[in-house]
Image (tube, grey):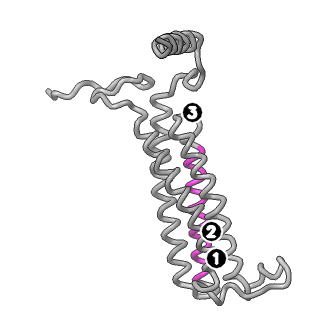
Amino acid sequence: MSDRPPIPPVGTTEDPHGVPPRAFVSASGLVFQTVGAVFLLGSCGFWSLSGVIAPDATADVDTWAALFTPAHAGAAALAAGLLTTFVGGAALATVGMGLTGQTRRSGVLATILALAMATAYAAIAVILVVHRGLCVAAAVATVFALVCVVLGALAVHSASLLRRFPPPPDQNKATKAFLQAHERKRAARIRRESL
């Protein structure tokens, strides 16, 4: 026989080891927020240095349609990478706030976002290598794709925890009892301070 306590049934909020069951979800949310902020701010820095990092891919084009020709595939891939990093970074930070707050659908949204970004970065890396031979930019896109795969794994586990241990439906609502207790504490503090 084992000394370990039995695993609680699905849907309960108790963990046999004393750790809150959704603590991993909150920690994953912090990781999402941090990576999102780094992507968001990093895309601004990369934009200003793109002419130095990949001068062949930053050639001038006359129209937007010219970006979609094989001759300018590198420039289009870099533009797509910058947009993915900027918009995706903001989205990762936003979804991270949902995970930190343990909202019900945040795990699923985080999974979809992370895997979509990983797919976009993988496609960008392939385009950069095949069309223009921009290996440094392709390596950066590959690293970003791997980071998004790791985020996807965190999101999948967070989604499963939120499904197994759902947060209470009134988690983010102030109940009447909570408001009354808060008002009593506030009144007591004001009385103490006025003496």
Given residues 181 and 90, the one toward you in this image is 181
Is 128 magenta? The answer is: yes
* Relative side of 87 to 64, left or right: left
**Residue beneath the point at 60% across and 61% down:** 40
Q: Disc 1 vs disc 3: which is toward the camera? A: 1
**Which residue in the protein does label 2 denote?**
44
Q: Main secondary structure of the magenta part?
A: helix
Q: Is 128 in front, or is 29?
A: 29
Residue to which mark 3 is pinned: 104
Q: Are marks 2 and 1 in contact (CB under 8 Å)?
A: yes
- In the rendered structure, which segment of residues is drawn in magenta? 109-129
Residue 41 in percent (x, y) is at 58, 63
Q: Is residue 164 above or below residue 73?
A: above
Element type where label 3 sits in the image: loop
Identified at 45% across, 46% down, the residue is: 28
Q: Amino acid at mark 1?
A: Ser
Residue annotated with mark 1: 48
